[in-house]
Each structure stands twice: as structure tokens, then as C-alpha cells.
Image: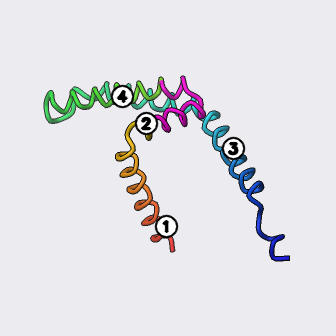
Amino acid sequence: MANEAVPSIEELKESVADLGHTAADTINANRKAAAESLEKASAAIHEKADQLPGGERVSGFAHKTADRLKNTARYVRKRDANGMMRDFGSGVKTHPVPALVVAAAAGFLAGRAFMRNE
């Protein structure tokens, strides 16, 4: 009786796979809109960059940021969710320590967010 309530390993694998497919489908469905938003942000930053206080240094930083947003938009248009996950996995393998630091920081921030909601 108690075993009926506990899902099997195969059921858990199937649930995780379904969740992964749903997430990938959602990402793929929203890629175009995300890329367009990134490009609009890039254009707006480029347009205002030379008007920012702080001189050439701030302006140059703003232009570089806008260029990175535009490159990110191209990447999002070009790669589907599976391709992004492959790239992410490669980055983690290439740079494991920074990946662990980022994961720890994200976990800490997520934990704090959940603690506030209680």
C-alpha cells in the first residue's frame, strides 16, 4: 500500500523529461519575442549612450552593452532551447569554478526570496 503512493524511478524520469520538453517548448515559443525585445533595448541604449553624463567612458560602456544585447538577440534567434543547453553545458565544463559560484549565488538568492514569502 505504501509503495503505491511513491512514484517509481521510471515515473520520475518520465516526469522530469516531460517537464524538460515543456520548458524547451516554452523557450522556443518565446525566442522571437525575446530577441526583438533585446534588439529594441540595444537600439535604445545606442540612441541615448552619447547623451549620458560621465563622458566617453560611460558612453563607450553603454555602446558595448548595447552591442552585447544585440549579439545576445542574434544568439537567441539562432539557437533553440536544446542548443542553448548544450552551450551552457560546455561553458560549465570549461569553467566549472565560476559556474559553481554562480549556482551558489543563485541558490542563495532563491532561498532568500522564498524565505521572504513565508
Which comes sooner in the sequence, label 4 or label 2?
Answer: 4
- Foreground label between 1 and 2: 2
Look at the numbered disc 1 and give the secondary structure of its residue. Answer: helix
Neighbour tally class for label 2: few under 14, some 14-19, many 20 plus, Cα within 10 Å: few
Which comes sooner in the sequence, label 3 or label 4?
Answer: 3
- The amino acid type, in three-letter code, at marker 4 is Arg
53 sits left or right of 27 in the view: left
- The amino acid type, in three-letter code, at marker 3 is Thr
Which comes sooner in the sequence, label 1 or label 2?
Answer: 2
> Which residue: 60% across, 38% down?
27
- The amino acid type, in three-letter code, at marker 1 is Phe
Residue 68 badge: 4
- Foreground label between 3 and 2: 2
Instruction: Look at mark 3 in the image and give the residue it sits on.
Output: 22
Instruction: Look at mark 1 in the image and give the residue it sits on.
Output: 114
> Which residue: 60% across, 33% down?
82
Which comes sooner in the sequence, label 1 or label 4?
Answer: 4
Rendering coords of residue 112 (x, y %): 42, 66
**Disc 1 vs disc 4: Cβ atoms closer than 8 Å?**
no
Q: Is 60 one of the magenta-colored residues?
A: no
